[in-house]
Amino acid sequence: MDIVNQFLWVIFPYICIALFIFGHIYRYRTDKFHWTAKSSEFIEKKQLMIGSLLFHLGIIPVVFGHIGGLGIPKSWMQAIGVNDHLYHIGAVYIGGFFGVVTLVGMFILTFRRFSKKNVRQLSSFSDLAVNSILLFIVFIGVYATFITNAVVPDFDYRTTISVWFRGLFYLNPNPALMSNVPLTFQLHVLTAFAIFALWPFTRLVHVWSVPLNYAGRSYILYRRHKHTK
Ligand code: HEM
């Protein structure tokens, strides 16, 4: 059993992190010109707009929630006055709300990809897999937030998952912290690492090309035109 825990909570996450880092370097160096979200807007627009909007509106706060819940130690939160009760309300109600928004968006996007004939025909195996895995990760995350937290009230992911997760970055992860975590959370974390490993080889690379400067730049860009004599 120890060897299984060692694999699941030490070896597997590090393989995924390594694939994430070196996969991006490899993809950028060998396949720069296919670095794209592969939009299928020209085939079907309405469902794409609604699904994509909901997914992206939901996932951004969820990412910030993950940074807070996984990255900031419980004691630090308590030191600034965020006790267990307050944290729990924020995580379940605010986190859960954005989780549901993400889930509805992801469901629409996945349903569209599988059910619209032309979109499906244009999709590669990788596109279908990314959608399905993301849908699963989001579903099980929302399920764990609402159901598992209620069914197993004594379980605290901030003294188990979060401590183990931070240990990965200190190169000292303790697999024992993960061995008694409820199955839904374990599945959520393992599939999340799997998507990190696949990330550089899929359309998810588009995330790193978000044109953030759009928000602050002027609407029209004027460029000096060089006249040639
Ligand atoms: C190793 C990486 C990850 C870990 C350790 C992790 C851990 C967690 C934990 C502990 C919760 C429960 C939060 C609560 O009950 O308050 C949660 C919820 C959730 N996770 Fe993750 N997660 C990871 C990656 C991801 C990824 C990649 C996605 C999306 C693609 C995701 C989407 C969600 C969603 C939608 C929820 C429910 C809403 C929320 O509580 O924010 N997670 N995750």
Image (cartoon, grey):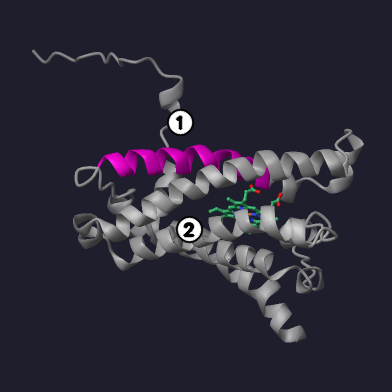
Give the residue pinned by disc 1.
212
Dividing the image into 4 quarters, which one contains the N terminus? bottom right
- Residue 18 position in % (x across, y down): 56, 65
Q: Is residue 168 left or right of residue 126?
A: right
Q: Secondary structure at mark 2?
A: helix
Cβ at disc 2 under 8 Å from ligand 1: no
Q: Amino acid at mark 2?
A: Leu
Q: Residues within 10 Å of mark 2 (few under 14, many from 20)?
A: many
> Is 172 placed left or right of 14 in the picture?
right
> Gap in Å between the C-alphas at discs 1 and 2?
26 Å
Q: How crowded is the residue under tag 1: few (<14 C-alpha within 10 Å), some, or many (20+)?
A: few
Name the image quarter holding residue 217.
top left
Circle 1 sits in a helix, a strand or a loop, which is it? helix
Q: Which residue occupies the extreme left position in the image?
A: 229
| Residue 60, quarter of picture | top right
Viewer-proximal residue among 44 and 208: 44
**What's the amino acid at mark 1?**
Leu
> Picture coordinates of residue 35 (x, y %)?
33, 50
| Above or below: residue 83 compared with residue 221 | below
Residue drawn at (45%, 44%) of the image: 208
Q: Position of residue 196 (x, y in %)?
A: 53, 60
Q: Position of residue 215 (x, y in %)?
A: 45, 23
> Which region is colored magenta?
45-66
Q: Please identify the quarter of the rendering in which residue 65 is found.
A: top right
Report if the CB atoms under discs 1 and 2 are less than 8 Å apart: no
Of pointers 1 and 2, the one earlier in the residue sequence: 2
Q: Residue at 27% x, 15% y: name it.
A: 223
At 34% from the left edge and 48% from the top edge, which residue is drawn? 37
Q: Is residue 38 left or right of residue 69?
A: left
Residue hosting label 2: 135
Magenta part, dominant SS: helix
